[in-house]
């Protein structure tokens, strides 16, 4: 009986100790205030700021051990990342109701960076399947990074990207045009109000259009382009590159970005039709970059491809431009290192800082003036400059059908720049010539008495170039 009582007493003591330990553990768990990175006893925007400061400068703004434990609220266990700051921002905005937030499989939520939201345009408005896209009449506002797939037709409306705090949510807003037709008659069809990065992705096998109306934007949007971006914007294609985006600006400029514009894939056709205002096609104020796997076709009443404060870099792809003013214009440098560029305008390639051709196949024509050769010190690929004699046409220019060098020109011309990797120093060139679109054979283009064009320097200039259907006797005698 005593043994039983002793055993009972021992068991009771162990059970009581276990209860005590459980209570202590519960108290410790209750002591964790998830999201309280600065350990001030509450969860606010200041905690998100503390996390970002700690990530940016850990020596100066490092979190305490307690603060670090509190801060790991997004996919807990993966350490402190910008996603934790985003989760706290979302909690403060009441987009989520508790912390920590987790999107491990089976836990009921989705990673906001990789979530796919479907936006179905239906004429005057839209419906949404997913998060972070709000519809107000014809305006669809995207408020968070992630994937947003858009299909259908919007007759007069806008896709507005507006991230509340791009420092806290620095991931890319990925817009996928999946058979979308968007018209912005009274405001930009796509407006990037605030975002660190936005990409316009052209889904494979789809055709997409963006256009405006016949009336210039007024009020808050006076002077805005059909696509207006305050931050960086990139145009991408799918894996196969079979998607097409056609941008038609009847009244406004087509595409303006305060920062950087990149074209990295797909087929993009851009046309501006306002002859009175000479509207421009593309203006990336800080820079414009074109990379491989892009087909970029531009017809503009004003400038074609332009950076009003920085550089234009063409690194690859196929670029075809017909412009009423400058085909390609840069405030600093035009850098062509790859791809195929066919550009025609009143002025072909116009840069303030330099014209650097180091690769690619380039044909640039102009009616007003040839390029400034003093700015071509960075050009390393053989380049031929043809200053053509007056044609028999009334304005002295040649028809675009009078082409040579294997290029098809985009508009009439007086001056021609050609550059390819084949133009190596020491090479003698003759050209197959097309007159009014019909081949008339080789050796009929002349500079003075010469039918051969010697590549003796990097930059080679030929004056009074003519196309003749027969070789003059003086030339035969000279040869």
Image (cartoon, rainbow, N blue to C red):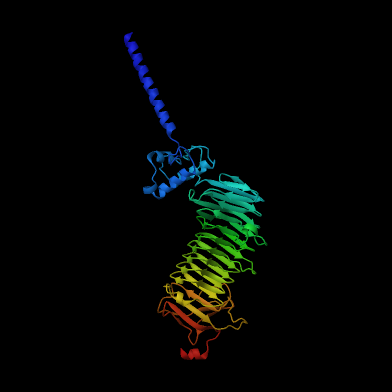
Residue 424 drawn at (x, y percent):
41, 76
Residue 136 drawn at (x, y percent):
63, 48
Residue 7 drawn at (x, y percent):
33, 14
Residue drawn at (48%, 91%) of the image: 477
Which quadrant holds residue 467?
A: bottom right
Is residue 243 found left or right of 4 in the rendered image?
right
360 vs 174: above or below: below
Q: Residue furthest top?
A: 1
Residue drawn at (43%, 33%) of the image: 31
223 vs 116: above or below: below
Residue 262 drawn at (x, y percent):
50, 60
Q: Residue furthest left?
A: 3
Q: Is any part of residue 445 visible from this angle?
A: no
Report the number of numbered marks.
0
Of 96 and 409, nearer the camera is: 96
Which quadrant holds residue 268?
A: bottom right
Of 125 and 222, nearer the camera is: 222
Looking at the rendered image, the quarter that the N terminus falls into is top left
Is residue 420 found left or right of 1 in the rendered image?
right
444 vs 85: above or below: below
Is residue 424 found left or right of 411 in the rendered image?
left
Q: Is any part of residue 67 visible from this angle?
A: yes
Q: Residue furthest front?
A: 40
């Amino acid at each position: 009986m005593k043994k039983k009582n002793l055993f009972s007493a021992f068991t009771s003591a162990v059970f009581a100790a276990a209860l005590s330990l459980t209570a202590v553990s519960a108290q410790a768990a209750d002591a964790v205030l998830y999201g309280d990175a600065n350990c001030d006893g509450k969860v606010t925007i200041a905690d998100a700021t503390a996390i970002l400061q700690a990530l940016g400068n850990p020596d100066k703004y490092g979190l305490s051990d307690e603060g670090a434990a509190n801060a790991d609220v997004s996919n807990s266990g993966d350490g402190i990342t910008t996603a934790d700051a985003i989760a706290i921002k979302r909690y403060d905005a009441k987009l989520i109701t508790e912390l920590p937030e987790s999107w491990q499989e089976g836990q009921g939520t989705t990673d906001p960076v990789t979530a796919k939201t479907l936006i179905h345009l239906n004429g005057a408005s839209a419906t949404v399947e997913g998060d972070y896209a709000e519809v107000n009449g014809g305006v669809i506002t995207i408020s968070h990074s992630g994937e947003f797939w858009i299909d259908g037709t919007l007759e007069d409306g806008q896709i507005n990207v507006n991230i509340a705090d791009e420092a806290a949510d620095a991931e890319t807003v990925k817009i996928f045009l999946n058979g979308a037709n968007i018209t912005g008659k009274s405001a930009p069809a796509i407006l990037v109000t605030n975002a660190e990065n936005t990409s316009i992705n052209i889904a494979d096998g789809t055709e997409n259009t963006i256009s405006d109306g016949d009336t210039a934007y007024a009020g808050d949007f006076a002077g805005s382009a059909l696509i207006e971006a305050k931050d960086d914007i990139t145009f991408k294609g799918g894996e196969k590159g079979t998607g097409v985006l056609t941008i038609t600006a009847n009244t406004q400029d087509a595409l303006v970005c305060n920062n950087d514009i990149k074209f990295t894939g797909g087929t993009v056709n851009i046309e501006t039709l306002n002859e009175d205002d000479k509207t421009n096609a593309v203006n990336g104020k800080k820079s414009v970059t074109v990379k491989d796997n892009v087909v970029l076709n531009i017809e503009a009443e004003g400038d074609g491809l332009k950076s009003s404060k920085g550089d234009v870099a063409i690194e690859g792809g196929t670029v075809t431009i017909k412009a009423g003013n400058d085909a390609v214009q840069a405030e600093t440098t035009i850098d062509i290192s790859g791809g195929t560029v066919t550009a025609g305008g009143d002025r072909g390639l116009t840069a303030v800082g330099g014209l650097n051709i180091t690769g690619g196949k380039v044909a640039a024509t102009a009616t007003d003036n040839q390029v400034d050769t003093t700015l071509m010190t960075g050009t390393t690929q053989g380049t031929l400059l043809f200053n053509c004699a007056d044609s028999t046409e009334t304005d002295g220019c040649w028809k675009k059908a009078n082409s040579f060098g294997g290029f098809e020109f985009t508009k009439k011309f007086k001056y021609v720049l050609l550059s390819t990797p084949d133009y190596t120093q020491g090479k003698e060139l003759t050209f197959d010539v097309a007159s009014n679109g019909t081949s008339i054979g080789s050796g009929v283009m002349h500079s003075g008495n010469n039918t051969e064009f010697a590549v003796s320097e990097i930059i080679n200039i030929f004056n009074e170039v003519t196309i003749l259907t027969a070789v003059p006797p003086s030339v035969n005698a000279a040869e």
